[in-house]
């Protein structure tokens, strides 16, 4: 949002502010905000009365443990919400639709590094609902000609990351716990590895996709990852401080690592921020 506005774009934000992990929400006074659910009929008013040319679809019930506990709510919101937005884009002749999906589509049976042509292995309601949205995007491109772009994000972190509750991303939880003087809680043995992607790299991938003239990207799935992975235990040690272990969770992969050759070829995108450097800078800022 901020980067779109900085580049002179008009932005309308639809967010019902129901995230279970967000303590506060960021607002830019140059954007228009609608506190609506994407399943609400009100959303059509934006398409009907605003000059929309691109939709960035990031709305979702997006935490895996939450989805295991609330499968109907998560699947209804993520699948039907995506379907509704795609249909509105088709009905009102919107040019482009950029869909935020998930690396959890790869599950357990695929070996790293993960490539977009691997078979899907959805282990929880969240990944099922997001991958179903991918298929909707492909269909709306092939059947109706909507310019859809599908991104599978790998463990996004960075400024304004959610901090609240047990469903927050691990780096946010670690910094919240350390700030509160509590030990960091590591799920399982901590040797599971994740490819962490800085939020600014995710923003850059979306902006490139919004502007590209390369028709080969439409209807395609592309990984957006850092191209390196780190164990959860090593991240706790990078941050520094006490930590404790708690039981492992079901439905989560042991290792993730993005192969980013496809997005580099089609969009010229390469990640710029490395997790170790970001943590070192944050630790330095905390001490100052």
Image (spheres, helix red, strand yellow):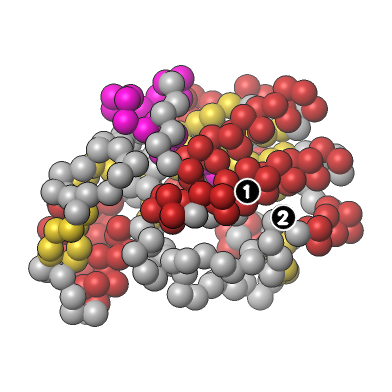
- Say which quarter of the image contains residue 136: top right
Residue under the image location 15 percent in, 70 percent down: 183
From the viewer's perspective, is residue 132 above or below residue 51?
A: above
Q: Please give the name of the residue rendered at 70% of the width and 26% of the height, measured from the top-left corner.
A: 139
Mark identifier at residue 76: 1
From this view, report whether residue 115 is shown above or below residue 200.
Answer: above
List x then y, in percent, for residue 191.
Answer: 15, 44
| Extent of the magenta region | 100-118
Residue where numbered disc 2 is placed: 39
Q: Secondary structure at mark 1?
A: helix
Q: Are marks 2 and 1 in contact (CB under 8 Å)?
A: yes
> Which of the 4 quarters of the picture holds residue 244?
bottom left
First in residue order: circle 2 vs circle 1: 2
**Magenta span has 104?**
yes
- Can you give x and y, in whole percent of width and height, for residue 40 in the image? 76, 59
Left or right, 124 with respect to 218, comes to left
Disc number for residue 256: none
Q: Nearer the viewer, residue 98 or 91?
A: 91
Outermost residue, right direction? 49
For the question of whether residue 259 can be seen, the reply is no
In the picture provided, is 38 more to the left or to the right than 173? right
Q: Secondary structure at mark 2?
A: loop
**Residue 81: percent from left, percent from top:** 67, 49
- Whether residue 152 is situated above or below residue 218 in the rendered picture: below
């Amino acid at each position: 949002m901020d980067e779109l506005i900085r580049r002179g774009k008009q932005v309308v934000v639809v967010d019902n502010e129901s995230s279970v992990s967000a303590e506060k929400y960021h607002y830019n006074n140059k954007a228009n905000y609608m506190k609506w659910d994407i399943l609400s009929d009100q959303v059509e008013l934006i398409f009907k009365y605003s000059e929309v040319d691109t939709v960035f679809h990031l709305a979702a019930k997006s935490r895996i443990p939450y989805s295991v506990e609330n499968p109907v709510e998560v699947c209804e919101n993520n699948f039907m919400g995506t379907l509704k937005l795609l249909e509105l884009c088709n009905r009102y002749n919107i040019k482009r639709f950029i869909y935020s999906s998930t690396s959890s589509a790869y599950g357990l049976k695929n070996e790293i590094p993960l490539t977009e042509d691997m078979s899907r292995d959805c282990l929880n309601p969240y990944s099922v609902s997001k991958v179903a949205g991918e298929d909707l995007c492909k269909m709306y491109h092939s059947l109706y000609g909507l310019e859809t772009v599908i991104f599978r994000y790998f463990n996004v972190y960075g400024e304004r990351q959610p901090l609240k509750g047990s469903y927050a991303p691990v780096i946010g939880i670690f910094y919240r716990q350390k700030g509160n003087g509590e030990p960091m809680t590591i799920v399982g043995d901590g040797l599971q590895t994740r490819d962490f992607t800085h939020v600014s790299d995710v923003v850059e991938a979306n902006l490139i996709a919004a502007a590209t003239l390369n028709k080969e990207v439409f209807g395609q799935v592309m990984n957006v990852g850092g191209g390196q992975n780190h164990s959860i235990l090593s991240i706790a040690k990078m941050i520094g401080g006490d930590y404790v272990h708690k039981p492992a969770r079901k439905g989560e992969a042991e290792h993730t690592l993005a192969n980013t050759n496809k997005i580099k070829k089609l969009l010229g995108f390469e990640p710029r921020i490395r997790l170790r450097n970001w943590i070192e800078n944050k630790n330095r800022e905390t001490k100052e």
